[in-house]
Image: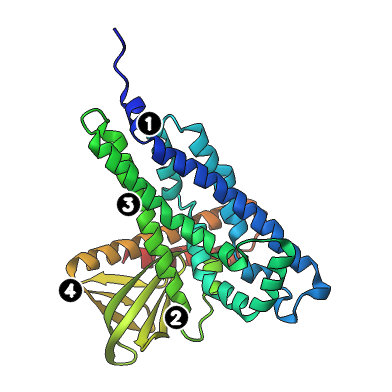
Amino acid sequence: MSARPSSSDVAEHCCRNVLIELISTEQQYVEDLIIGIERYSRIFQQRSSLPSGLVGQQHVLLSNITDIVALHRHRLLPLLLQHRQQLELLFERWYSLVERDVFYCYVLFTASQRESLRLYHSHELYFRRMQLTMGDPLGLRSFLLKPVQRVTKYPLLLNRFIQAFFEHRQVISKRIFELACRLETRLRELLERANQADQLNDITSFNASSILNEGRFVTMGEFQLIDGRLRRCYSCKLFAFTTCLIYTEQKSCKQVLRGTFVLPDVCVVAKAKSFLLCNKQHECEFLCPKALVKKWEAMVRHLLEQFVSVAFGDVVATAEQSTDNASGQQQAVQRKSINRTIWYAMQ
């Protein structure tokens, strides 16, 4: 009498075609990125023939694609190959990568893509000539779009897994179904976060890269804002980072920067249908439904707690490394910084 196939075997069998497509396209994606980086990095080594507008602009044109390659080449692709017959473990570890913000490189890439494409279009004729010289059938613009195209495909593939699991729900374990759903949700949230980061480019006279270099982008929300400093109400967008919160006023298709709350010097106060952000200089009231009030209050408090944890760890590390003859004044400054941070976080 033949043994009854396990839930894992059934899951692998019913999703075999999707799994094969996921792995094969992942392998091709990694290969395309490696070839593209090698091909277009060489352009910047030929300084004598490089247009003046491209000199020193490799980091703008190619952004952080090298980080994306490293993620897929050394982490995601090996994970897919290693656990191709253990889908439950595959989804669990993939989910863990997303939870640990390993895919944040896509948020950075999306935030910088407009500037990258602008640079491409301003030198399009040069890149088309180089495309012919290199024998690249698709060209640089196609290469620059690949990361966004790939990351948007993951939720679609996960949906096909979920559909197959549902059709075989009588023999599929509940856990593998739940893991696939949780992973699909997290990947969609990653896409939403990346799209929100792209809106930083709509802010006039604003250098997004300077903030992104100091802290991570977290989320964005749209509100009616009562601005205590300007003494008026207007439609605004509130952008949250791990180092600060900035708010803008909607002006046609553009956003005008109106203010910044630098962490940890900010206090959040929840009301019935709004929440306040304030510091010693000004106060802003953001009007929104109760569910959003709870979400943003919890998020700001979490950012403050994280800031306290990091600040405290940095000071402790500095104290451990300092010599025995460190001045009392320096120690007092450190204690004052910690106390101030804790005060704001606990309000």
Measuring from the top left, give residue 294's x and y in whole percent.
23, 64
Residue lying at the far right of the rendered structure:
48
Q: Measure the C-alpha gap from mark 4 to mark 3.
A: 27 Å
Query: Which residue has dot 1 on it?
Result: 12
Q: Amino acid at mark 1?
A: Glu
Measuring from the top left, give residue 192's x and y in whole percent.
37, 63
Of callouts 4 and 1, the N-terminal one = 1
Query: Which residue has dot 3 on it?
Result: 185
Relative to 140, is 96 above or below? Answer: above
Marks 3 & 2, CB-CB < 8 Å contact: no
Measuring from the top left, give residue 144's x and y in whole percent.
57, 65
Q: Measure the C-alpha gap from mark 1 to mark 2.
A: 45 Å
Of callouts 3 and 2, the N-terminal one = 3
Q: Secondary structure at mark 1?
A: helix
Which colouring convention does the figure follow?
rainbow
Which residue is pictured at 34% across the width and 49% down the height? Answer: 184
Q: Residues within 10 Å of mark 4 (few under 14, many from 20)?
A: some
Query: Which residue has dot 2 on it?
Result: 202
Nearer-the-camera pick, 244 or 79? 79
Q: Secondary structure at mark 2?
A: helix
Of callouts 1 and 2, the N-terminal one = 1
